[in-house]
Image: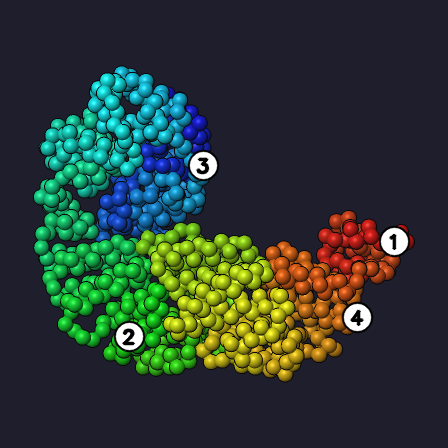
Amino acid sequence: MGESGIIGRDADLAVLDAFVERATNSAAALALSGDAGVGKTALLDAAAGYARARGVRVLSASGAEFEAGIAFAGLHQLLSPLVPDDGAAKPLAVALGMREGPPPSRAQVTDAVVEVLAAAQPVLVTVDDLHWLDRPSAMVLTDVVRRRSPRRAGFLVTVRAGDAGLDGADVHEVRPLTDEAATAILRTQFPAMARHVIGRLVREAQGNPLALLELPVSLTSDQQRGSSALPETLPLTDRLSAVFAARVSALPASVRRTLLLPALEDRVRLDLVEAAGRDLAQAVRAGLVDVDRGRVTFRHPLTRSAVVALSTSDERRQAHAVLARRLRDRPDRYAWHLAHTAAEPDEHIAGLLEQAAGRTHRRGDTAGAVAALLRAADLSPAGADRSRRLVEAAYLGAVAGGQLRRVPRLLDDAQRGDADPAPALGSAVAAAHYLLLSGEGDIETAHRLLTGALELREGPWDAVVVEAVTTLGWVCYFGGRADLWDAFHHVVARLGPDVPAPVAFVRAFFGDPARAALPVLGELDEAIAALDDRVAPIDVVRTSLAGIFVDRLAACREPLRRLRNRPDAGQAATVELHTLTLLGLERFHAGDWAEAQVLADEHVRLADDGGYQLLRCLGLYLQAMVAAGQGDDAAVVELTNRMVGWAAPRGVTLVSRLAAQPRTLAALGRGDYDSAFRHASTVSPPGVFASHVPHALWFVLDLTESAVRTGRPDEAAAHVAAAREARLDAISPRYRLLVHAAAAMAAPDEEAMPAFEAVLAQPDSGQWPYERARVLLAHGERLRRARLNRQARTQLEHAREIFAGLGAEAWRARAERELRPAGPHRPELLTAQQRTIVRLAAEGLTNKQIAQRLFLSARTVSTHLYQAFPKLGVTSRAGLRDALSRLPEDET
């Protein structure tokens, strides 16, 4: 590697040396990250040369902005020479357009790539400019890297600083060169350059090798030698493209025309380039392109951009026509090149593009499908076909592609071109998504638009109808009124009895889960268990959303994490936003509030960037929940005021109900029980789980506790009775904990003590530390009032410990206040046998080992420890050693 001739990169080359060595024996992945022009490509080429010297096969590809929207273009560069069209690799051959067949899933394509690479190992896969690689190819490569298979395969990619790398790969930052190395480069490449000119260029280039090599090109010979003054402003990063354009424009016209073909079709086959020999040889000598294994590639993407920019429109149309004729065997590329030849509307080409859009969407590339549909609409004569394509683009963009801000213009254009006054169902869905999720938040109009369009449709349940009815359910949910749901239930009943799962889930889990969830919980659990990489991202999210009010987020965590870590091609912004919220809410319940905060902050930022004002409120809600738990009352007020201030004028009742929860928790934390009762009662009154108010389930403990503490025992008892009548405790272990804890709080003292003990004895209650700590606190308060100070102190100290670990400062302070009247801890007397068992347990022996030593049963040992813990004031074996040290001499 030291013979590579690269100046100033010894440390980087050593890293690559070690990486290639590792990749020859085991799976390895590395991303070179750095600014444009910092030298990542040179390092990549050096690593590839080292691998070839060791007998490793090198497969190379480079991302290009012209092909970023073409699904699997990157995999085509890498693997098309190796892919057989049958056997295990058949799905890959179909994805690459090399043969016909049913659209493969991403998992099938990934399996096929692994199979092909396994046959070639040892192999090094290099991808230059990963940030410009098409997303389907990038995600398949990510899946392969995660598997760490095949065993002797290395993946080396370059990415711009700040862009996402290859998930699962190590990252090595390629930093700017030192001034010493930069000076050495200029002296080597331009030996006649004057010293002061070198100094000026070193300062201006700031360690960027591309700038060091290209900036001198814009200088005259006199300027380089120092005999003429340098320009006041030298071309830096923003002007490097002009440098490339100058190099391209210096070529003869015939060479530029030859280069236009590979510029418009990356890594084009040599046989597709007319007059290739002489013209390409001149371009190779100029350092603009390489010809390797029958394919033409540009050494830098800016050169490719310059070739296109310097061509005329007629030259580009002619080049596209040549490529279209020669790529008939690749229908998607054929359609796109043909589209670029059209100077006026052409229904035939529009139809080909629409077919290409369908294939692209089936491959999971929604963004590419929308682009094809929009181009098809541009080429469509005015009329129904153009309007239909615009509506389809708006529909896919809003529902699956997350392109919310384009929806109004597309629908407006479609309406102007369509004489049919009846709203198309796809158009209604797209418009409803915009009205619902954007800053408009217009619940009434979205509801009216969808119900009107659905009234014109009869069965069966096709995909568009399912999407429309599901969207209607979401509108009803965000609207939060029972009367909105009446229209939903009417539409579902009219469309037939075989209700699809997405619609059934919306009806059961968002409509009225207190009464409708239990009968279909089994179906939801089965759907969650089936969430794997083959399930579409939007379906992963929607299935997970159905689990919010029935406490299934923990079961959805892994599918959601996989989804977040490997965003799919064309993934909707709504999918990403919901993924963040769902993971954040799950982390909040699990007690990982720091991660919940990170997820909430990212959600709010993305929602702001995309204009998703309603979904932004969900991120604000999660931020407010963390603030409420931590006792940051000012943040709770500020965040919930922003939520309600946006939602109330628009009638988005759901957001106001969401805001009530952190307000209630904050009030409980600071001991303001009247405010807590008032906030909780706005969602649903005590003793009632209001119809079509799913959030009421979340308040079962909060409403009961605030009622008890404000002298409303009848209301507290009524709410517990309502929870039991609704069988909330049958929904999940967490609801069982909440309902039984509420019952203990509402019970008289003689019933409360055993009730609290039963709640805390639930084997899985530790999964929800915040709720468990609240129960411990309530139990300790009851014990203290009953003057059972020793037992009270044990529970209160445990509660304080959990609250402190969570960062729940206000709740920790509450536990501290309760501990003071309980007095200092005074250990009770232990029996002789208890002392022996405790001493052995403190030494680290297990119950079984203690039992064997003392000739007792393990159950007897466990019983003695259970009785000794409260006497010593500890809650686990970890505290036994310290507790024993505090005992009087005669006790030890």
Comparing labels 4 and 1, the label whose residue is closer to the camera: 4
Q: Which residue: 20% across, 37% down?
A: 306
> Dot 2: what SS?
helix
What is the C-alpha distance between the residues marked 4 and 1? 25 Å
Residue 629 horizontal side relative to residue 757, left or right: left
Dot 2 or dot 1, earlier in sequence: 2
What is the C-alpha distance between the residues marked 2 and 1? 78 Å
CB under 8 Å between discs 3 and 2 = no
Comparing labels 3 and 2, the label whose residue is closer to the camera: 2
What is the C-alpha distance between the residues marked 3 and 1? 61 Å
At label 1, the amino acid type is Pro
Residue 887 horizontal side relative to residue 465, left or right: right
The residue indicated by pointer 1 is 888
> Dot 4: what SS?
loop
The residue indicated by pointer 2 is 449
**Residue 320, quarter of picture:** top left
Dot 3 or dot 1, earlier in sequence: 3
The residue indicated by pointer 3 is 26
**Residue 532, quarter of picture:** bottom left
Dot 3 or dot 4, earlier in sequence: 3
The residue indicated by pointer 4 is 787
Dot 3 or dot 2, earlier in sequence: 3
The colour scheme used here is rainbow
> Dot 3: what SS?
loop
CB under 8 Å between discs 2 and 1 = no
CB under 8 Å between discs 4 and 1 = no
What is the C-alpha distance between the residues marked 3 and 2? 58 Å
Crowding around mark 3 (Cα neighbors within 10 Å: few <14, some 14 to 19, many 20+) is some
